[in-house]
Amino acid sequence: MAKTEDLTVTIANREGTCAECSIEIESGTMITRKLPQDVFCLTCSDLDHLVYLPSGNTALTRRARKYSTLSAVVMKFSKSRRRNERQGVLVTTEGLVHAEEECLSDEDQRAKRRERDQVRTEKKDGKYIQEFAAEICRLFPGCPDKTASDIANHACEKYSGRVGRTSGAKELEESYVTLAVRAHIRHTETNYDELLSKSYDREWAREQIRDKIEDVVILWQERSIVIN
Ligand SMILES: [Zn+2]
């Protein structure tokens, strides 16, 4: 059966009277037209059994129309933009239900896929965090294991823009590992954060703690000084 793709329902911009049953048509109600001056209420248009589905969910709209034996596009003339704008569609109840079921099952599928992807990512990242921690321990044998693990976790934290997530760190370049270690020292072994809270002048604050960071870096690089 051919679809009535071009059937258009208009939201009335002004009051009127149905050309067939003479019922009063309020502004804002749905009508059809034959000639510009002839408006018909939805009942006389044989469309009042349809349900309105506003625009917004493209997949739902497409499917609802597909499964509806009769559907119409709902348009409204925008006075400010001087053009007809699509508001939604009229579809059959059965078509809408069918479409909703299908979209829901898609969401289900997507949720399951997200779950699978997440498990994979977590496994991979767990391995990566271990490698990152091992690299810290290799470069900084004086760094306590627990600290190395904390630094690696922090640096690799998912979805953060921290150094551990950059592509360079993925290859475990020494400079990235060192950056992560220095960042950790800056925030935990010095009063950097306190300085920042006093005056948000990063350059000045970094100047204040430069020596302290170097001290800890040297300490951690020296295996002989390890005191765990
Ligand atoms: Zn009528």
Image (cartoon, rainbow, N blue to C red):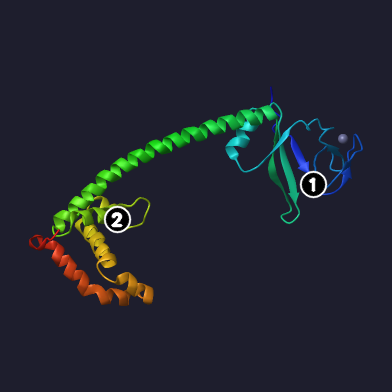
Residue 175, image x, y percentages? 21, 60
Q: Which residue is the site of mark 2?
A: 155
Judge whether 51 appears above or below 128 on screen.
above
Q: Is residue 6 visible?
A: no
Q: Depth check: 104 or 188 in front? A: 188
- The quadrant in which the C terminus is found is bottom left
Going by the image, does 156 lie left or right of 11?
Answer: left
Q: What element carries label 1?
A: loop
For disc 2, the neighbor class at 10 Å (few under 14, some 14 to 19, many from 20) is many
| Quadrant of the picture in which ligand 1 is shown | top right
Query: What is the quadrant of residue 200 in the picture?
Result: bottom left
Going by the image, does 83 lie left or right of 151?
Answer: right
Query: Which is more N-terminal, label 2 or label 1?
Result: 1
Residue extending farthest right: 22
**Mark 2 lies within 8 Å of ligand 1 (Cβ measured):** no
**Tag count:** 2
Which label number is shown at residue 95?
Answer: none
Q: Which amino acid does label 1 sit on?
A: Gly
Q: Depth check: 42 or 98 in front? A: 98
User: How far apart are the two marked residues, 1 and 2, measured between alpha carbons?
Assistant: 57 Å
Q: What residue type is labelled 2?
A: Ala
Query: What is the quadrant of residue 162 in the picture?
Result: bottom left
Going by the image, does 38 lie left or right of 58?
Answer: right
- The quadrant in which the N terminus is found is top right
Residue 55, image x, y percentages? 65, 42
* x 56%, y 33%: residue: 103
Which label number is shown at residue 28?
Answer: 1
Judge whether 81 appears above or below 24 on screen.
below
Judge whether 50 appears above or below 128 on screen.
above
